[in-house]
């Protein structure tokens, strides 16, 4: 029948078109992860690898430092609502198309083009005891609340989170703006004609239509928080003070690269990978777009 | 070529008739002022690092220590210590090559996963996207050893392939998200007209996805341009990118911050350039998608 | 610029040669055929880099058939890079290596230089330096590293600040230090400044300079082995007492308030606002350029009785990769590093050569040498080069907060002790590996 022939053609095209991506990912990401799993059960300094076995995992998981590091990751998640909410607001602002909005749109994305090294150094200056934040507070008459955020473990993590949220503003704003641009304006018009207030329109009409994009930004943001902050942490705090800003990603780097224990680094890397997959699955379940045909 | 395809799922609806609501217009005027002010405030917050960058890129070491005064000493030092031009060129080559691969691979597979279901494609898609979570630091050493075995670390090849592989999951995810927004009827209509699925992808879907392509290009360009670890391990010294070069400026104990800032300023320019270029296409693509 | 093109051409040739060499049966080259050797360093652009580049150029003049390509690698990941390159044998011929336990950690891909470099050349090096780069820290086992320079962890002070505040003699123990601080504070100076200037990006101040001197105040050189093996646990009362005195520096206002986040300590010392700083020989030239004759060296007096030792140690140098294809030429370069001509080049870059019988032209560096030669202070190594890497990282993480007062001495030392307990037994034996 024509239908099944079509189905076969569709299937064949699907396999053909998705093959290059799958091949690339398997060859250059899948294989090394498999190797990393192997090495995670060894003591590997690059030249000699001594097999230890799965007990490496139980040793690692019973290390209190590991749990302290995980706690940092969990705390970092607390800033995700801000990392999504603020760009939503900014995108909504830009979407008003007030005069000059195109210029501002260009400007908001610019920080993304700056390397983490620069952002980290700026953050260092900003949060320093004699830095910009305290000067601002003093100018606003709040001099007594002067802080030295990078000196304490938890406050340093907060400073890191603030810098991270700031750095995601550009990317997420663009994502949401792209999403808002694909919205059918007649739907918004219809709602307005129906008498809904601005805020109601935003919450009841715009947001649900943006679910795909919010889901996307959500996933990207959490992935960034867990696996793209390395350079920023490196420059801003070096993981400190104490273990204050050592996220699991940084810990992977430290054990693997700084201490030259490639096997242990691989181990924590595998753990990070598993955690991120789990978190990713949770995220995809949390925000299901209306037009999801089930994947 | 035919005119921009009309998406049958979104037929043109007549605009609401009747006089324009005056309250809407004045509401618009009322909110313009504060909105504008807010946008300016956000802009200042965003641009702050550039102020820092520009300020400190034009200082020498003493001026930096004392945060006072300006000079171009850092720039002479920068060009003395680094082959800036050739490193910028290397960065460009590596970025361009990797992005081309990423785009080719992700548009085709994004379309396949979004529209061309086959048995198990959902799982395969999840696996590809799951690869997004693979932490670079864990795989980079085995990756390096593999590449060295196949002699791919004596020129750009190894690095380009690794960058392409690293960027594919994200790009595929984005393209699939975007393609899901295209109605199935559009595809089926083209197929009914006699186009193969592959051609449908090339002639119908691909042109519609320019905004997403632009987004991927910009984001991946920045990511690859600013990457350190892959460039460090996989590129031979005279094929070094500017980011690795800048990192080599700092020793274990001292870093000349002004020189580093000067280098970072140069390094930021192409990324900004790419964004500004593709930004126009972003807009064009957006209006095309919305145009009736 | 021309030198760069030369280096690039040489590197390209080296790559081609390496490509061909891996297929043909061993190269090696005769004395006449041109050979290129590659040296990696993590010196950035500072004095050590200048010294190394000049050494390479001078060596090339003496050996026209040998080209030396010096490659600057980022300092952050340097050792991981070396390790990674050793797997496919893709690395340089010679590379900068830190001495002490660092050397022993990576010796699996380093060549033992006994027999490689003639004993007569090795004899020219400060014997104190060579032993720290050999197995079990015994020089007769053969060194793995030819040191580039002798370094000091040392204190710098501003003579004019001292004079204006009425500090007439350099403090030699804790109490004298506190007294000096009081006077300096009264005169409006920051007595001792701490900060992360002069550290890698993102780090806090490096606590191991101070820690070395605190352990000098508590133990003898041979006792330091006990810190390594665990016979003297990190939680010992003597260690805790020293750290207690150290935190008093911050709580009594002897240091700036923001020790953990200050980014401008170097500037503050160079401008005279701060009177004292604990640092090292890599900044001597910087300070003498900024302060001229106002700056002098002193031994950080972290001891209850007059401090009796100084950290004088060859912290880094060059080693040969075990897989290098040009061992003959490598040996020639390493030998060259021990010559008086090399010593002159190293000194000209502001460093103290590790070759016996040479002098240094920077007066403040000479002061430091005099601490050993004239004042007969005991020579100690850098503590962070002779305790395990995990301990060094743990110390880096936790000790700065101790000075800051945000972490208790007990808790920090407990952390060090726990890190020590988790080490495999091979890494905390009664003898050095």
Image: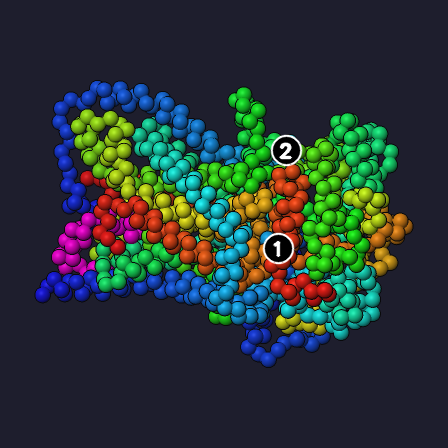
The answer as to whether the residues below labels 2 and 1 share one chain is: no
- Tag 1 secondary structure: helix
Residue extending farthest to the left is A1
The residue at the point 80 percent across, 29 percent down is C183
The residue at the point 59 percent across, 43 percent down is A241
Please give the residue where the numbered disc 1 appears in the rendered image: C419
Magenta stretch holds residue C193: no
Q: Which mark is residue B67?
A: 2
Q: Quadrant of the C terminus of chain A?
A: bottom left
- Tag 2 secondary structure: loop
From the top left corner, tell me how far across and down residue B148 is, in percent: 51, 68
Comparing A8 with B272, the one in front is: A8
Q: Based on the displayed image, in which of its 4 quarters is residue C196 positioned?
A: top right
Q: Which mark is residue C40?
A: none
What are the residue bounds of the magenta stretch? B174-198
In this rendering, the answer to whether B35 lies above or below C169 is: above
């Amino acid at each position: 029948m024509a239908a099944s022939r079509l189905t076969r053609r569709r299937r064949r095209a699907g396999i053909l078109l998705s093959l290059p991506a799958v091949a690339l990912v398997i060859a250059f990401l899948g294989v090394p992860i498999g190797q990393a799993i192997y090495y995670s059960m060894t003591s590997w300094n690059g030249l000699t690898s001594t097999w230890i076995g799965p007990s490496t995992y139980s040793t690692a998981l019973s290390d209190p430092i590991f749990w302290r590091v995980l706690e940092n990751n969990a705390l970092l998640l607390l800033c995700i609502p801000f990392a999504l909410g603020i760009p939503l607001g900014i995108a909504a602002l830009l979407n008003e198309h007030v005069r000059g909005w195109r210029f501002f749109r260009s400007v908001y994305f610019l920080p993304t083009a700056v390397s983490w090294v620069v952002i980290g150094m700026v953050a260092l200056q900003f949060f320093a005891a004699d830095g910009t934040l305290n000067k601002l507070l003093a100018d606003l008459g709040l001099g007594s609340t002067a802080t030295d955020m990078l000196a304490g473990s938890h406050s340093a993590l907060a400073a890191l989170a603030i810098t991270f949220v700031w750095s995601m503003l550009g990317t997420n704003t663009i994502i949401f703006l792209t999403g808002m641009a694909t919205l059918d304006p007649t739907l918004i018009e219809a709602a307005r004609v129906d008498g809904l207030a601005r805020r109601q329109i935003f919450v009841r009409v715009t947001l649900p239509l943006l679910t795909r994009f919010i889901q996307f930004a959500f996933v990207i943001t959490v992935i960034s928080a867990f696996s793209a902050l390395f350079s920023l942490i490196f420059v801003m705090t070096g993981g400190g003070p104490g273990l204050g800003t050592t996220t699991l990603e940084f810990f992977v780097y430290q054990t693997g690269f700084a201490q030259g224990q490639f096997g242990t680094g691989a181990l924590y890397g595998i753990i990070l990978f598993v955690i991120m997959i789990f978190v990713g699955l949770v995220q995809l379940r949390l925000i299901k777009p209306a037009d999801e045909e089930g994947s | 070529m035919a005119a921009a395809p009309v998406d049958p799922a979104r037929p043109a609806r007549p605009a609401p008739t009747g006089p324009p609501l005056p309250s809407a217009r004045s509401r618009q005027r009322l909110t313009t002022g504060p909105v504008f002010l807010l946008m300016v405030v956000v802009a200042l917050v965003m641009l702050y690092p550039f102020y820092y960058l520009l300020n400190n890129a034009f200082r020498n070491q003493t001026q930096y220590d004392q945060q006072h005064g300006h000079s171009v000493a850092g720039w002479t030092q920068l060009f003395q210590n680094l082959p800036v031009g050739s490193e910028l060129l290397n960065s460009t080559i590596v970025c361009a090559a990797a992005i081309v691969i990423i785009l080719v691979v992700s548009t085709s597979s994004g379309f396949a996963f979004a529209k061309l279901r086959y048995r198990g494609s959902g799982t395969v898609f999840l696996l590809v996207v799951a690869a997004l979570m693979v932490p670079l630091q864990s795989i980079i050493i085995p990756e390096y050893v593999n590449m060295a075995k196949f002699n791919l670390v004596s020129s750009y090849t190894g690095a380009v392939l690794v960058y392409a592989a690293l960027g594919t999951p994200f790009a595929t995810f984005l393209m699939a998200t975007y393609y899901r927004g295209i109605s199935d009827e559009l595809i089926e209509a083209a197929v009914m007209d006699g186009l193969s699925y592959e051609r449908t992808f090339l002639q119908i879907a691909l042109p519609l996805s320019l905004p997403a392509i632009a987004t991927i290009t910009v984001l991946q360009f920045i990511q690859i341009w600013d990457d350190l670890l892959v460039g460090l391990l996989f590129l031979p010294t005279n094929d070094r990118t500017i980011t690795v070069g800048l990192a080599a400026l700092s020793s274990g104990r001292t870093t000349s911050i002004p020189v580093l800032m000067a280098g970072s300023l140069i390094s930021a320019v192409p990324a900004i350039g790419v964004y500004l270029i593709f930004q126009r296409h972003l807009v064009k693509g957006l209006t095309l998608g919305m145009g009736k | 610029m021309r030198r760069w093109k030369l280096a690039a051409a040489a590197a390209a040739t080296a790559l081609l040669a390496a490509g061909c060499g891996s297929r043909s049966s061993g190269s090696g080259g005769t004395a006449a055929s041109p050979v290129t050797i590659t040296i990696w360093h993590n010196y950035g652009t500072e004095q050590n880099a200048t010294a190394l580049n000049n050494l390479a150029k001078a060596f090339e003049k003496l050996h026209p058939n040998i080209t030396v390509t010096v490659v600057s690698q980022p300092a952050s990941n340097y050792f991981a890079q070396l390790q990674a390159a050793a797997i496919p044998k893709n690395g340089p011929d010679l590379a900068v290596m830190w001495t002490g336990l660092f050397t022993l950690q990576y010796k699996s891909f380093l060549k033992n230089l006994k027999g490689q470099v003639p004993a007569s050349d090795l004899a020219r090096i400060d014997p104190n330096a060579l032993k720290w780069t050999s197995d079990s820290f015994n020089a007769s086992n053969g060194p793995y590293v030819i040191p580039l320079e002798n370094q000091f962890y040392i204190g710098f002070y501003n003579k004019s600040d001292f004079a204006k505040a009425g500090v007439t003699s350099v403090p030699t123990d804790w109490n004298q230090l506190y007294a000096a601080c009081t006077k300096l504070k009264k005169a409006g100076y920051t007595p001792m400044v701490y900060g992360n200037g002069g550290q890698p990006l993102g780090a806090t101040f490096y606590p191991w300079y101070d820690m070395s001197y605190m352990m000098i105040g508590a133990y003898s050189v041979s006792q330091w082995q006990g810190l390594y093996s665990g016979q003297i646990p990190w939680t010992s009362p003597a260690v805790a007492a020293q750290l207690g005195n150290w935190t008093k520096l911050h709580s009594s206002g002897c240091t700036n308030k923001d020790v953990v986040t200050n980014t401008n300590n170097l500037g503050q010392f160079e401008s005279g606002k701060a009177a004292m700083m604990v640092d090292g020989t890599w900044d001597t030239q910087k300070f003498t350029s900024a302060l001229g004759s106002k700056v002098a060296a002193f031994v950080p007096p972290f001891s209850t009785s007059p401090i009796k030792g100084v950290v004088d140690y060859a912290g880094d140098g060059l080693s040969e990769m075990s897989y290098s294809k040009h061992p003959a030429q490598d040996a020639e370069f390493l030998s060259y590093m021990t010559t008086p001509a090399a010593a002159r080049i190293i000194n000209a870059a502001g460093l103290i050569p590790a070759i016996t019988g040479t002098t240094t032209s920077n007066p403040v560096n000479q002061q430091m040498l005099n601490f050993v030669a004239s004042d007969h202070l005991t020579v100690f190594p850098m503590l962070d080069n002779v305790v395990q890497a995990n301990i060094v990282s743990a110390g880096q993480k936790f000790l700065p907060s101790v000075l800051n007062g945000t972490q208790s001495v007990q808790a920090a030392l407990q952390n060090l002790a726990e890190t020590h307990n988790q080490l495999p037994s091979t890494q905390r034996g009664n003898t050095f590996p």
